[in-house]
Each structure stands twice: as C-alpha cells, then as structure tokens.
Image (cartoon, rainbow, N blue to C red):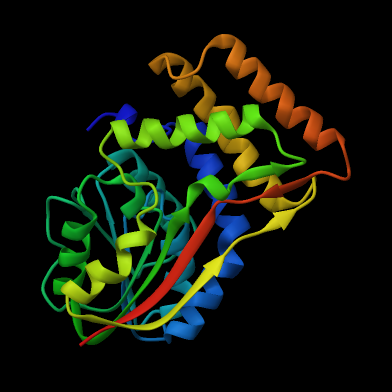
Amino acid sequence: MSDRDYVLGTHDAEIERLGFQHQVWREHALDAWRRAGITTGQTVIDVGAGPGYASEDLAKIVGESGQVIAVERSRRFLDALTARTRRHRLHNVSTIEVDVVDATFGEAVADAAWCRWVLSFVREPKAVIGHLARALKPGGVAVFHEYLDYRSWRLAPRSTMFERFVDAVIDSVRAEGGKIDSGLALRHHLADAGFEIRSARPIIEIVPPGNAFWQWPASFVASFLERLLASGRLTAQDAADTRAALTAAKADRRSLMVTPLVLEIVARKR
C-alpha cells in the first residue's frame, strides 16, 4: 500500500498533524476509556493505530503488567510508533503490520479494543468489526469514535463554499471505497458480531476561532485541499475560495465552527 492509499499520506507532516489531532481529542478518548473500564494489567488492541499516539497513552494506562497491540498496515507509521515508545521507554507495546480489513488480529487475546476514525475510511467496516470481535475475550469491551454526520461540519455564519468543500471530502472518501458516516451502521454491525451496546453518545464541538477544536479541522482543510485539486473535485478557484472563507471566519471573533458529529459507542462482547 502506498502513502496515497491513506487520506493524507504517511509523511512526516501528516504524522505531526495526527499528533496534534490526538492531543485535541485526547480528553474525549481518556474519558471513554475510563468509562469502558480499561485499566492496569489489561491487553488492549489499538485498531488502525496510525503512528500510535493513542497506543502510547494506552500503554501508560495498562502499565508494565499490561500490553498494547498496535494493528496498522503502514510500516512508516509503525516505525514512528516504535521510535517513540523506545524513546519513552515503553516496553509493553507490540505491533502487527496488517491491513485491518484483510487480516485477523488473533483469537481471544485482548480485554479491550480502541478504534477511532478507521471504519469511516475502509471498504469493509463489517470485516474489521469481525476481526476485532474474534480478538477480544468473552466480556471484552470495544470503544469506537466514528463519524455519524460529517455534513454537520459547518461555519457559522454559514459559508456555502466551505460546505462545498465538505461535500467534496465526502465524495472523495466514497470514491475510494469508504463510508464516512460509518457510525450510522455501527450498532447493527456490532450486534451481528455478538456485541451488546453499553453506551452510545454524540460528540460535537461548537467553538470560536483560536480553540483547539477549530484548529484541528482547519489543519485538515489545508492538507486535503491539495488532494481535491489533484482529483479534479475542486478547481483552483474553489480552493482559493475555501481558504478565503476559512480565513475570513477565523478573523471574525463572532464566528463559530461546528465540528463533524462523532458517535461514541462502548460495546461488550457477549
């Protein structure tokens, strides 16, 4: 698989952007893990771990008596994770280099699993959930953060150009086999795989300029515009208009950004 198979590649700038993204969303993740009961001594699978920022946090939670298994198909991302865990002297993180759609993660090897913004970008979300279910022990928990309504991502006051950009992102993901609003089918997929839902809740932020939850999607815009230009989904003028709309909104302290609606589900394997 090449870098272009990922939404924004696997280069150094994207690894850095993903680090910022994790920091922005970290409190939501930590809260979900606490409520799911992830704790010392457990084995946790990080599904689609990327460069492993969540894996690192999970490793600190489960401690030396626990283990984190980072499942990821990008060797470059896994190398970044391995370098960071060595630097921070975390010895309880192992990696599996596989495509989360095509390969299993093991049989009844884990107490818990974490999956964030993976199902929204793969061609077969149900297959991933099936692999995850087999890897969990009976009674194991799985925590998901997946998009439920990507079109909720808006500026206030409304910007039709910005909404056109959001639509182009959705079309791009769909053309590459993804189902960006994967949260819509998640409950049914989990039930089919033998899970019961412990909790389900929405996560959405409505923030002014300068807030980290404004900066997070804004950094995505800057990177993804180039991909939309290359695919012909937006013109150079469209890209310029999108940048101008975001810049104007950022300069107006009265502006708000509504982030894409995310569904959090905590499920238990029967």
Question: Whole-percent x and y of residue 96?
Answer: 21, 56
Q: Residue at x 43, y 33 (%)?
A: 8
Question: Whole-percent x and y of residue 46?
Answer: 34, 63
**Could you say which is closer to the camera, residue 185 or residue 17?**
185
Q: Against 135, is 220 above or below?
A: above
Q: Against 145, is 11 above or below?
A: above
* Residue 39 in sight here: no
Question: Whole-percent x and y of residue 53?
Answer: 47, 56
Q: Against 206, is 74 above or below?
A: above
Q: Is residue 248 left or right of residue 96?
A: right
* Outermost residue toward the top in this view: 236
Q: Residue at x 18, y 51 (%)?
A: 101
Q: Residue at x 88, y 45 (%)?
A: 254
* Residue 7 picture quarter: top left
Which image quarter is the C terminus in? Answer: bottom left
Q: Is residue 3 left or right of residue 156?
A: left
**Could you say which is closer to the camera, residue 114 or residue 70?**
114
Q: Residue at x 43, y 83 (%)?
A: 36
Which image quarter is the N terminus in? Answer: top left
* Residue 107 in sight here: yes
Q: Against 247, is 270 above or below?
A: below
Q: Is residue 136 left or right of residue 63?
A: left
Question: Whole-percent x and y of residue 72?
Answer: 28, 51
Q: How many marks?
A: 0
**Could you say which is closer to the camera, residue 88 or residue 123?**
123
